[in-house]
Image (cartoon, rainbow, N blue to C red):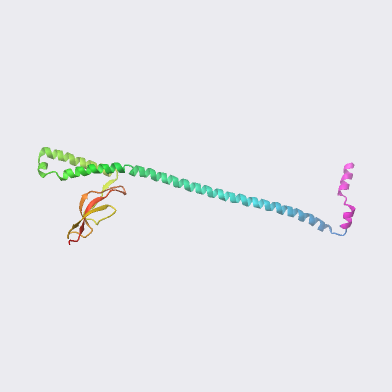
Amino acid sequence: MNNENEKQGAEAPDPEIAEELRGVPEDMLSDGEDASDEEDGDESGGDLADAIAELRRDLDAAKQDVLYARAETQNVRRRLEKDVADARNYGATGFARDILSVADNIARALEHVPDALREDDKSRRFIEGIEATRREIDKVFAQNGISRIAAVGLPLDPNQHQAMMEVPTDEAEPGTVVQEMQAGYMLRDRLLRPAMVGVAKTPD
């Protein structure tokens, strides 16, 4: 009973307020209340939209960071793969250069063997052994990607030939390699040692 009276008292309008609102349509009073609610809703919706926009910006930034990190990882992997390949292909460059001097000495020795020694049976077997050693060295060179640079009869190539002198001659075009003092070699696609050559020039 008391609760009902309190409820009725709470719902009963203040007489002074009721007097001021006399003649005002009910729908205008309800619209005012709804407008207040909508403003509150708009403020709440605006805050939510801002929060979503901020989250989207954070997500885009995170995606960019992931893409950059992935690209950097790929670059590092490619660099490591190249370093490993270079070490495998060119790691023995210094050793290969040292072995070239051995091949040079064997070639020079064979070039200076007199014909008389080649005709002697004992000497011929010894010389044939040296020639077999030279062929074995050439085979090992080929197996390890070491190849001799072509020189004589070709135009001078500064990337592979080192001109040591000019040779006056009418038998070759000026700039043509006509003499090879020391053979040049490539290690796969890299210059191991240039060929030392003489180059034709027009006679004075």
Horizontal side of residue 100 vs 8, given as left or right: left
Horizontal side of residue 183 vs 57, given as left or right: left
- Vertically, is 36 above or below 77? below
Foreground of the two, 51 or 194: 194
Foreground of the two, 81 or 177: 177
Magenta stretch: dominant secondary structure: helix
Determine the residue positioned at 44% across, 45% down. Answer: 76
Q: For the view shown, which residue lies furthest in the bottom direction?
A: 204
Q: Which residues are magenta?
A: 1-20
Specify whether residue 138 is in view.
no
What is the quadrant of residue 108 in the picture? top left
Q: For the view shown, which residue lies furthest in the top direction?
A: 122
Question: Is residue 10 one of those drawn in magenta?
Answer: yes
Residue 102 image position (x, y, % from top left): 23, 41
Residue 58 image position (x, y, % from top left): 59, 49
Question: Is residue 131 one of those drawn in magenta?
Answer: no
Quadrant of the frame with the C terminus: bottom left
Horizontal side of residue 57 vs 93, given as left or right: right
Q: What is the tally of numbered marks visible in this picture?
A: 0
- Vertically, is 194 above or below 132? below
Quadrant of the frame with the N terminus: top right
Specify whether residue 70 is in view.
yes
Determine the residue positioned at 15% across, 38% down. Answer: 126
Determine the residue positioned at 81% across, 58% down. Answer: 28
Horizontal side of residue 13 vs 190, given as left or right: right
Residue 44 image position (x, y, % from top left): 70, 51
